[in-house]
Image (tube, rainbow, N blue to C red):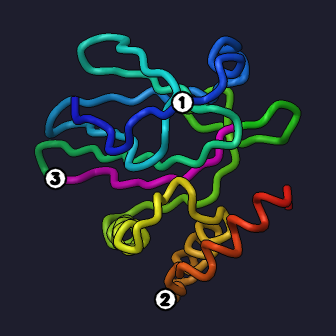
């Protein structure tokens, strides 16, 4: 199975101890057939289910991205990319087949052309020295809406990021 790109990071022991607060992502990797992976994010736990499947746990509020790809003898049959925010207790959530209990969908797209645009946007954020998991959720929503309307998206900037970090520190 392909490794995730982000390493798990520390969260308080209370969060890890209460598995009920975590959002779980179950992914499958069968080389050349079904390839699903976490593109960015910081799982607090990982469990190997079997040879082809793993389950990652994310703390409430954590932002992460899942890339899903599938092919058959004729070529690619699925190319999908989702950016989600892990569910916080008591907040509304959306469900997806690979996600338990659910989360907030910040961006969802399918088709290689659109997935490629998302990957380029992530690469651009990383080129600024910013972890995409720490980027403003509003930026991911903006990118989602621009992709849905076939318009070009605004690039994420360090200034936007500083503003987001300040807003987040104030609890806004």
Asked if residue 5 lies left or right of residue 90, the reply is left
Frontmost of labels 1 and 2 is: 1
Identify residue for label 2: 152
Mark with earlier residue (1, 2): 1
Q: Residue at x 64, y 65 (%)?
A: 136
Label 2 near label 1: C-beta < 8 Å? no
The stretch drawn in magenta includes residue 105: no
Quadrant in the rendering for residue 102:
top right
Please state the horizontal and vertical placement of residue 85, each as a whole percent of the image: 64, 47
**Point 33% across, 28% down: residue:** 28
Quadrant the C terminus occupies: bottom right
Q: Is residue 65 above or below residue 167?
A: above
- Residue range in magenta is 75-86
Instruction: Return the mark for residue 10.
Output: 1
Q: CA distance from mark 1 to mark 3?
A: 40 Å
Quadrant for residue 1, please give it: top left
Asked if residue 124 is positioned above or below residue 168 in the image, the reply reads below
Q: Is residue 66 above or below residue 34?
A: below
Mark 3 residue element: strand
Image mark for residue 75: 3
Q: Earlier in the sequence, mark 1 or mark 3?
A: 1
Element at label 1:
loop
10 Å neighbourhood of mark 1: few (<14), some, or many (≥20)? few
Distance of label 2 from label 3 (alpha carbons)? 28 Å
Is residue 118 at least partly visible in the picture? no
Q: Is residue 100 visible?
A: yes
Measured as percent of width and height from the top left, residue 4 is found at 32, 38
Q: Nearer the viewer, residue 13 or 147?
A: 13
Q: Nearer the viewer, mark 2 or mark 3?
A: 2
Q: Position of residue 41 (x, y in %)?
A: 48, 45
Q: Name the N-terminal-most of marks 2 and 3.
A: 3
């Amino acid at each position: 199975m392909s490794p995730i790109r982000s390493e798990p990071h520390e969260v308080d022991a209370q969060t890890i101890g209460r598995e009920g607060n975590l959002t779980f992502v179950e992914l499958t990797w069968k080389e050349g057939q079904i390839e699903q992976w976490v593109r960015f994010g910081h799982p607090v736990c990982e469990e190997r289910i079997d040879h082809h499947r793993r389950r990652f746990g994310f703390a409430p509020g954590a932002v992460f991205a899942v890339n899903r790809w599938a092919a058959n003898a004729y070529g690619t049959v699925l190319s999908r990319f989702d950016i989600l925010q892990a569910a916080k207790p008591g907040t509304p959530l959306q469900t997806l087949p690979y996600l338990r209990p659910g989360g907030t969908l910040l961006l969802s797209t399918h088709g290689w052309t659109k997935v490629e645009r998302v990957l380029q946007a992530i690469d651009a954020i990383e080129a600024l020295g910013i972890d995409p998991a720490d980027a403003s959720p509003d930026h991911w929503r903006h990118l989602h809406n621009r992709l849905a309307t076939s318009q070009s998206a605004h690039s994420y900037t360090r200034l936007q990021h500083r503003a987001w970090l300040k807003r987040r520190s104030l609890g806004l």
